[in-house]
Image (cartoon, rainbow, N blue to C red):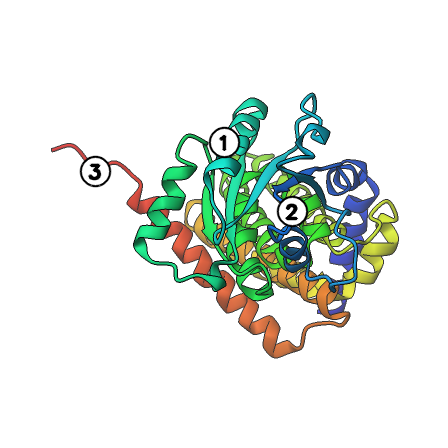
Amino acid sequence: MKLGSIAAMGDFWKVVREFNPEGIERDATAPMDIWLLGEPESGRHTLARSVLGAEPSSEVGRLFTLFDLGEKQDLIPLGEKPDLIILVVRLDRPLAEVAKQASALVNRIRVPAILVFTHADTVEIVRDLRNTAYRAFSFVSFVRTLFVDARGRDEVQGKLIPIILDAIPGIRTPLARRIPAARNAVTQQIIEETSRVNAQFALLANLPANLPFIGGVAGSLADFFVLTKNQVMMVLRLATIYGRDVTLTRQVLAEMAPVIGNGLLWRSAARMTVGMLPTLIAAAPKAAIAYVGTYVAGQAARYYFDEGRKPPQELLKSFSSEGTRLYRQTLDRGQSSEPAAQP
């Protein structure tokens, strides 16, 4: 097993030498602009600090740009377009005027917008009050509407961050880099997506094995290089979310190799086992191995970036069990989406 480990890690570094991390770094540090609009004392600053998990005395400008609705509305640069608008409205004040101002602005800029009613803790939120709020802003197109206490960090993060991620999924990586509370959701998405892609490719890579003479070699090489490259990309994307400089690729991956090595080596050993099976029979196990091996490597990397240490063996086993469960779920969804056979 020791010789196999050395060979697998040697092949791993061959893939790394051909890898260019500039696109991943560029994606993670892409500029983004979220506007927080509202009247003075609407709770914008408090909401921003709750999203960021920041202290009351800290600045919120590293992610949000705050603008006033009302007397200072002329300062809003109407020639620019943010990635997202979050309109913050006090529920305990008259809504008609702010709704009129917001309507003119949001409908003119035409970007995804979220409506957040704050100070919900100071009034009794009965059905009539909710209906009044909805009617006041019914002529503005919002992605979602929320009623929250802006001071409640857990509530704000639990409700608002998933909506932000759904509203602007194209910039989820720089968003998670800037908002620590968004990291779990985004990194989980990245790990599951990469695991699915590797499982799908493992099935496709198994097809050339049916070709005489060169088929087995071609399938094996494609399997190794593409799956490993996808795993490297996944780990580096996770690294950027946690603020690591991935232009120092070899340094980051040298640090990570002992952490993700278990996932790589486990996959290699399992592939050897199924390699003794006939091609068509081996296809399904190879896909499962690609999924679970990638999932374990991703979760191990995420744990290391988050905790600063290798995951214990018991946790690695739980990653493997969870990966197996998710893979079976993926299979079940795929089968349920297939059209029914015609009689």
Q: Element at badge 1?
A: helix
Pick whichever of labels 2 and 1 is earlier in the sequence: 2
**Tag 2: Cα neighbours inside 10 Å, few (<14), some, or many (≥20)?**
some
Q: CA distance from mark 1 to mark 3?
A: 51 Å
Pick whichever of labels 2 and 3 is earlier in the sequence: 2
User: Camera-side residue: 116 or 290?
Assistant: 116
Q: Element at badge 3?
A: loop
Amino acid identity at mark 1:
Lys
User: Camera-side residue: 193 or 67?
Assistant: 67
> Pointer 2: what residue?
40
Amino acid identity at mark 2:
Pro
> Pointer 1: what residue?
100
Left or right of 142 in this view: 213: right
Which disc number belongs to residue 306? none
> Pointer 3: what residue?
340
- Are dots 2 and 1 in contact, CB under 8 Å? no
Q: Element at badge 2?
A: loop
Q: CA distance from mark 2 to mark 1?
A: 16 Å
Residue drawn at (78%, 61%) of the image: 256
Q: Quadrant of the N terminus?
A: bottom right
Q: CA distance from mark 2 to mark 3?
A: 58 Å
Residue 32 sits in which quadrant?
Answer: top right
Q: Kindly tell me whether residue 173 is visible in this rendering.
A: yes
Residue drawn at (75%, 40%) of the image: 24
**Tag 1: Cα neighbours inside 10 Å, few (<14), some, or many (≥20)?**
some
Answer above or below: position of 303 versus 31.
below
Looking at the picture, how far across and down is residue 21, in whole percent? 80, 40
